[in-house]
Structure formats: structure tokens, C-alpha cells
């Protein structure tokens, strides 16, 4: 028999050593994974700050890394702007549907959140618009 008690999260298991060994390993791996995972939200500002610090302190061969950080910051900024536009369009669709129902005899209509497929459709339209040079 093997008994295991994790003091970090109060996980407890008892059983034949061969039967519980895999569960104990999985539990310890879970702690290792969650303890080493970053808790910092990566933002364009953080990426640009890191690039600026690298520019000040790094060797001459760091230009590729600095450029990659700046490109990542630009990409992340565009993604955030796109998500904001999508949120605004989803809200407009929900508001428009509510107004239509209220105008057509359902004054108490409350719009339901739109499914993810609508967000995906809006994202596809915005991507197509971004391709159009006009």
C-alpha cells in the first residue's frame, strides 16, 4: 500500500503502489506545469519595453530578436484592435435584432448572445476587407 498526501493542494490518495503511481506522477506534473506557467499577460507595451531594453543592453547580433519582438507587438496590437471591432459589431447586431423585435410587437425582447459562428463570420468579413486595397 502506498499513501500520498500533497501539502500544496491537500490531494490525498491511498492504494496499491502500482495502482496509484501513475496518478501521483500526473498530480506532481500538474503542479510542475502550473507552477512554471507564466502569469504575465503579454501586451504590445511589454514587448516594446523588452525590445527597447535589448536595444540598450544587447550585443550587436540582437537586431533580429529586437525586430521579431517589435513585429510581434505590432501583430498583437492588430489582433486586439480586430477583437475590439468584432465586439462592437456583435453588439450592433444584438442591438439591431432587439430593436427589430421591439418594433414588431415584442417590447420585452432581450437579445441573446450571438453564437461563436457569428463572430467567426464577422472575423472573415473583416479579414476580406483588410485584403481589399480600397
Image: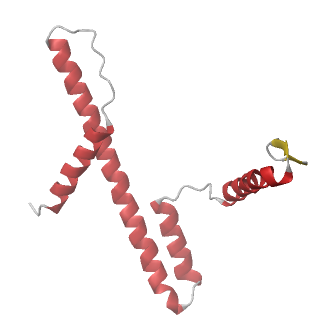
Query: Going 37% across and 65% down the picture, which residue do you hit?
Result: 74
Please name whichever residue, 130 or 10, is drawn nearer the observer in this view of the structure.
10
The residue at 39%/71% (across/down) is 71
- The answer to which of 108 and 8 lies nearer the viewer is 8
For the point 83% across and 42% down, which residue is it?
12
**In the rendered view, does 110 fall on the left or right side of 64?**
left
Quadrant housing residue 25: bottom right
In this orientation, which residue lies closer to the viewer: 56 or 8?
A: 8
Of residues 65 and 31, the one drawn nearer to the viewer in this rendering: 31
Please tell me which residue is depicted at 85% across the width and 48% down the height of the picture. Answer: 16
Percent of width and height locating residue 40: 59, 56
- Colour option used: secondary structure
Relative to 105, is 40 above or below? below
Could you tell me residue 20's position as x and y percent? Answer: 79, 50
15 on left or right of 39:
right
Circle count:
0
Q: Residue furthest bottom?
A: 60
21 up-or-down from 63: above or below: above
Q: Where is residue 101 in the image (x, y as percent from the top left)?
A: 19, 16
Q: Quadrant of the C terminus?
A: bottom left
Residue 38, how many percent across, how many down?
62, 59
Relative height, residue 49 to residue 22 (above, below): below
Furthest residue toward left: 134
Amino acid at each position: 500500500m502506498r499513501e500520498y498526501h500533497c501539502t500544496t493542494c491537500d490531494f490525498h490518495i491511498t492504494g496499491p503502489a502500482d495502482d496509484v503511481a501513475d496518478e501521483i506522477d500526473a498530480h506532481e506534473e500538474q503542479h510542475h506545469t502550473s507552477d512554471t506557467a507564466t502569469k504575465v499577460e503579454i501586451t504590445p507595451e511589454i514587448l516594446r519595453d523588452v525590445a527597447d531594453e535589448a536595444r540598450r543592453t544587447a550585443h550587436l547580433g540582437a537586431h533580429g530578436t529586437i525586430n521579431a519582438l517589435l513585429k510581434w507587438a505590432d501583430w498583437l496590437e492588430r489582433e486586439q484592435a480586430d477583437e475590439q471591432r468584432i465586439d462592437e459589431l456583435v453588439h450592433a447586431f444584438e442591438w439591431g435584432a432587439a430593436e427589430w423585435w421591439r418594433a414588431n410587437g415584442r417590447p420585452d425582447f432581450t437579445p441573446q448572445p450571438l453564437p461563436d459562428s457569428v463572430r467567426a463570420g464577422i472575423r472573415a468579413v473583416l479579414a476580406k476587407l483588410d485584403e481589399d486595397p480600397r
